Amino acid sequence: MKLTYADAGVDIDKKSDAIETLVKNLLYTRKGVGKRIEMHGGYAGFVEFGGYALGICTDGVGTKLMIANEMHKWDTIGIDCVAMNANDLICVGAEPLAFVDYIAIDKPDEEIAHQIGLGLAEGARQANVSLVGGEFAILPDMVNGFDLSGTCLGWIKKNKLITGKKCAPGDAIIGIRSSGIHSNGLSLARKVLEVNEIRCDENFPRLGRNIGMELLEPTRIYVKEILRVVKSCAVNGIAHITGSGLRNFVRLHSDREFRIEEPLEPQPIFTILEEMGNITDKELYQTFNMGMGMAMILPQKHTQKALAILNKTVEAKIVGKVYKGKGACNSKLGVEYMRY
């Protein structure tokens, strides 16, 4: 049996259809300060604020929380919550400023709340954002366990927005290494464990620890590295490789082909999931980050300077190039995607 994300209950195409239907109704915008800035794709919404654009985005940790519950370890999921939001904001070059969290829980639990707070504080430190509030909702009739999400506010000068429109044939694609599975594709990862009757506390020699701890490895926060590059180099596009994998490139520009030719080596966790779930290459690269958590598109003349900045703190290399055409692909494996 070849397992897919849809088998785990997440159909990417149906999700995209639902989002398109939803967005068609979201037409209202105020005038003047707070007027919506129209952008194709992107990972956050922006509004006018004088000469600046204020950005806001929201995201959660997803079913990674179920791994945390099984491991009785909740002190890192707050990092994931901040990461998923702050990493989205920086995709247009915006600097994250402030963060609020939302916890919906069936009954108050001081230990869980304490550990979540530790992670949120560490995530805020890494992203350099102020934690300014949140909501702790007790919903016994709606929630079984708890859910964690957050919202992040950021800013950038309007004339500095990186929208992807400038991505041009010949531009280099720099891939930045992920810390592991991050916070996407966990439904499929959990399905693989379920089908193989594997517990989260089972040790895997290739991982050097149990698989639960590997899946809980916090999402890398790229804020400081990306902002350093943006301040020093011409950057035409930035892609956060989350759920949908390589499909995330498609949202940058509808008339460009983003070709991954020399991908970063995926971490062992992805190989393990591939083998145990008999997952195809196409499914892997449209579900997981496969070792590349973030990508930057730059003119060739700026790549060496960008790599020098990035490789001081993270692993980065040129993984491909932009071509005339459409879609995104991994040319080594012969898989391509035409839709976000």
Image (cartoon, rainbow, N blue to C red):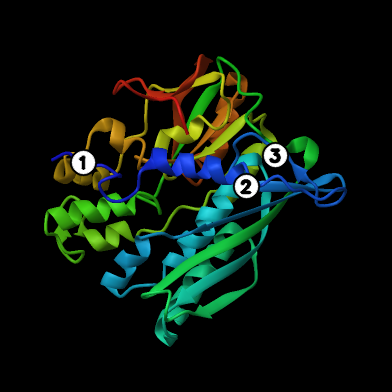
Give the amino acid at mark 3. Answer: Lys
Q: Residue 273 vs residue 248: left or right?
A: left
Instruction: Name the kind of residue labelled 2 in the image.
Output: Ala
Residue bearing the label numbered 1: 274
Q: Amino acid at mark 1?
A: Glu
Q: Is residue 241 visible?
A: no
Label 3 or label 2, whichever lies nearer to me, is 2
Q: Quadrant of residue 166?
A: top right
Q: Which mark is residue 20?
A: none
Numbered mark located on residue 44 in the image: 2
The circle drawn on residue 231 is 3
**Considering only order in the chain, which callout, 2 or 3, is on the residue closer to the N terminus?**
2
Q: CA distance from mark 1 to mark 2?
A: 31 Å
Residue 311 position within the rendered picture, expressed as x and y whole percent measured from the top left: 49, 39
* Res 218 quadrant in image: bottom left
Numbered disc in front, either 3 or 1? 1
User: Mark 1 falls on what kind of element?
Assistant: helix
Looking at the image, tell me whether mark 3 or mark 1 is earlier in sequence order: 3
